[in-house]
Amino acid sequence: MQAKSVRASHILLKSTQSRNPYDRFRDKQVTRSDADAEKGIREIRAQVENNLNLFAKIAQERSECSSCQKGGDLGEFTRGQMQKQFEDVAFALKVGELSQPVKSDSGWHIILRTG
């Protein structure tokens, strides 16, 4: 049976092609290319994949989503609340599992399912 809701955290790197290429939390325009955003999220994933305890700390330091203030925690959500590319991956993960890089209209993410 598929879960009706999941809880997840994420780290987001935006690019100039993101739907809103601005980091509101740090009050700066994002100037990196899409390829550089993908490369950056892959590097971050390599840092956290063997030590998920680093996830929240790195989210606070690097994520370009306001959830960075909560270590990337997005809370619990149901289908239809997130962009489809993000949602499909979040719902497919097992609790405690880290995604491969995911591209959405917002940018490049890695997702950690927490519940």
Image: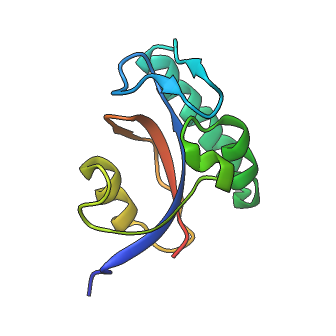
Q: Residue at x 62, y 33 (%)?
A: 43
Q: Left or right? Give the position of 115 relative to 77.
A: right
Q: Residue at x 35, y 51 (%)?
A: 86
Q: Left or right? Give the position of 97 relative to 47.
A: left
Q: Position of residue 13 (x, y in %)?
A: 52, 32
Colour mode of the rendering: rainbow
Q: Position of residue 74 (x, y in %)?
A: 51, 59
Q: Left or right? Give the position of 37 relative to 103.
A: right
Q: Quadrant of residue 66?
A: top right
- Of 84 and 22, the residue lying toward us: 22
Q: Left or right? Give the position of 72 relative to 56.
A: left
Q: Quadrant of residue 112?
A: bottom right
Q: Position of residue 106 (x, y in %)?
A: 38, 35
Number of marks in picture: 0
Q: Residue at x 58, y 28 (%)?
A: 40
Q: Quadrant of residue 53?
A: bottom right
Q: Residue at x 60, y 43 (%)?
A: 45
Whether residue 89 is situated above or below residue 77 in the rendered picture:
above
Q: Position of residue 9 (x, y in %)?
A: 55, 58
Quadrant showing the N terminus: bottom left
Whether residue 5 is situated above or below residue 109 in the rendered picture:
below
Looking at the image, which residue sits at the far bottom?
1
Whether residue 60 is situated above or below residue 13 in the rendered picture:
below
